[in-house]
Structure formats: C-alpha cells, structure tokens
Image (cartoon, helix red, strand yellow):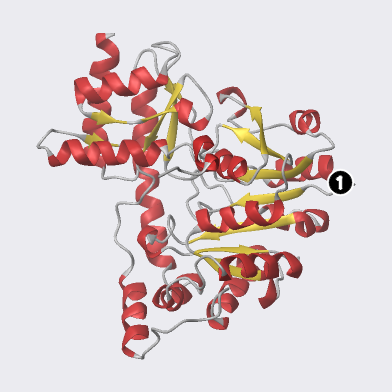
Amino acid sequence: MKIANRMENLSPSVTMAITALARELKAQGKDILSFSAGEPDFDTPELIKQAAIKAINEGHTKYTAVEGIIATKQAIINKLKKDHNLDYKLEGIVISNGAKHSLFNLFQVLVEEGDEVIIPAPYWVTYPEQVKFSGGVPVFIETDDSTEFKITPEQLKAAITPKTKILLLNTPSNPTGSVYSKEELLALGEVLKGTDIIVLSDEMYEKIMYNGKKFTACAEVSEDMYKRTVTINGLSKAVAMTGWRFGYIATPDVALAKALTKLQGQVTSNINTMTQYAAIPALEGEADETIEMMRVEFEKRKNYAVKAFNEIKGLSCVEPDGAFYLFVNIKNVTPDSMKFCADLLEEKGVALVPGLAFGTEGYVRFSFATDLATIQEGIKRIKEFVESK
C-alpha cells in the first residue's frame, strides 16, 4: 500500500518518541527516570472531574456545535477579558482537540504553498512540521542563552520578506521557559506595523510564571497587535488536563473563525462534549487555588534544578520565567545533543530531549514536571555522567 508523498516530509515527534521509549524501558524493569514529557505530574482538580461527571449524568453526551457550546465559549471570552482586558465575540472563538489541533487548523486555513512562517528557535517540535505539512516554509530566527532565547526587533525585521505570512510566538516558551515582557512585545509589534503579517501567539503556559513576573498576552499590548494576533491556548498544562484535549483560538477576525469551523466540521466536528462542560469552572477561575498550588510547587522544583545544574562543571542553564522546562547548555561537554541523550539514557537511565529536536544544537531539555525526589536523583545521575566524560 503506497503512502502519500506528503508524509515523507513529516517527522515524528521526538519528545513523544523519547517519552514512549522511556516508558517501554521502564516496563521492561529497567531503572528509568524520565524528564522528557511536557505533562504535569498533578491530577486534574477534583471540581473539574466532578463537572464532567455532572455533565454525563445530565445527559450532555451528544454532538455539539463544531466550534463548541456557547457556555464554554463565553467562559473563554470572560477569561480573556478578566485576565487581559481583551474583547472577543462568540463568533471569534473556536474550541479544538487541544492547542496542537488549533494550530494545525490555523496553518491549514492560513498558509498557501510557499508562504513563509517565522519561527524563533528553539521551538516546540510541532511548529515547523505543521507548517511544512501545510505547504509553508519555516523561517527560523536563531537565539541562545545570551538573549534568554528571545528574538530582537532587529532579527525580526531582517527575517521578513514579501512571502512572510505569519510570525509564531510562544510565551512562556517550550522548551526554554523564556517569557516576552510587555515592552519586548511592543517592540516586536512596531516592526510589524504597516504589514499584513499575522501573529500566532501560543500562550499555553501563561499561568505558570515565576520570579514574581506577570504574563503579558500578545494581543493586549496595542490595538495593532490585537487586530493581527490569533491567540492559541488551552488547559493542558496549567490545569493538568492533558488527556482531556481542550484547546482554543481567539481572534477578532470572525471570517477566520468561520473558516476554522468549516475545516474542523469536516475533520473532527466538536471536541468531546463532557470536556467542554468540565472546562467551564477551570476557565471561570474556580480551580485557581489548585492552579496556584501547582505553580508554587513547580517554582520550588525550578529553583532547586537551576541551582543544581549550574553547579555541575560543564553545564549551565538560564533561569526560566515560565513553563516547567530548563534548556540546559551542554556545549562544554559535547555539541552533540543526540549522542549526549542517548548515552545518558543507556548509562544512567535518565531520559532528556536533545536540543536538536527543538532546532538548537548544544542544549538538552529537562522537564521538572515531576516530584522533587525524582528531580534530585535525576540531576545526581546527570552529574555523575558529565563528570565521567
């Protein structure tokens, strides 16, 4: 059976592959510590689970509108107004099966053959694959720890061509945890003024912030940025709802939302109905106390891990302001992140993700979305491994 040619250029997710390998080795009885998954180790808050059970018991088990039920869309609108003073219409909200699905829909609807999409590197592994699958051309802007992995207005200006269709921003970032300030977003917005470039802003980790920093949404920094920004968000990370598959886009462009709904209607239709009902209390703030508990715990782990890594000779990492990852510089040990991760897994039973997967060689991603005891043991093994080299 011949597979379509379009699949030849689509790479599998390295993060998922490594996580699956670590799980398989563990099932074989091997002592494996995995820091590869971008998934909170906390359970979904009880009140959210109860909201889903209530929805089932009340018979909310049928199809819904493709783009989501009105009550959940209104909860998203209320959340964006409360958190960022942004105004959206019900017609500008589309709920999908996780933010990854939202992004896929967007690239399919917006990107024509040969359109360029600017992606700061390091980047989440899915971004360039979806762009290429849609016929677009990823254009990478390289960053490193000297700028906290953030692009400058000068870099953005230099990357723009007549074919540029989209700038993709991810703040807080996966894999680096870097966060753009209001001033930095304004400066990038100045470069875009007078262009038709769309900003896709992936804000999945917005609730997981550290060091007393406040998150700023791209769309809230100016009227011009509001008009050109499509916000992508969900509940997987901040509310520990990874398996529930809840993502959404918010846009002032109702025509775009209608096109996304048309596409989704021919692919998946609505996301599962119970998740839509369970999402409402999370969006309305009823789980905020639990979200803050998780954030505080993540920050404790972050503080320990940053200090511990920076004490290992040959390794260093920038302290992140958000998300739950460290992007650790291994260049003084080896520039080859794939070999580093493969040898570490084989010799010490520790699973990390190579920086090469995120488009930036010489680094590895360490997820601290696991308990402190595991983090301590994992870094101890990493230290032993590096010292042996």
On the image, which quarter does residue 179 sit in?
top right
Image height check: is 58 above or below 280?
below
Residue type for callout 1: Thr
Tell me the residue at 20%/28% (across/down): 349
In the orientation shown, which residue stands out farthest toward the left?
29
Q: Nearer the viewer, residue 6 or 136?
A: 6
Residue 377 placed where, x, y %? 21, 31
Residue 88 placed where, x, y %? 70, 71
Q: Which residue is mark 1?
A: 195
Residue 384 placed where, x, y %? 23, 17
The total number of labels drawn is 1
- Circle 1: element type: loop
Tell me the residue at 12%/33% (across/down): 30
Question: Which image quarter is the N terminus in?
Answer: top left
Q: Nearer the viewer, residue 95 or 163?
A: 163
Q: Nearer the viewer, residue 255 or 252?
A: 255
Q: Give the side of residue 337 with respect to residue 127, left or right.
A: left
Q: Residues within 10 Å of mark 1 (few under 14, many from 20)?
A: few
Residue 247 placed where, x, y %? 51, 62
Tell me the residue at 64%/69% (across/down): 262
In the orientation shown, which residue stands out farthest toward the bottom?
58
On the image, which quarter does residue 312 sit in?
top left
Tell me the residue at 11%/37% (across/down): 28
Question: Which image quarter is the C terminus in?
Answer: top left
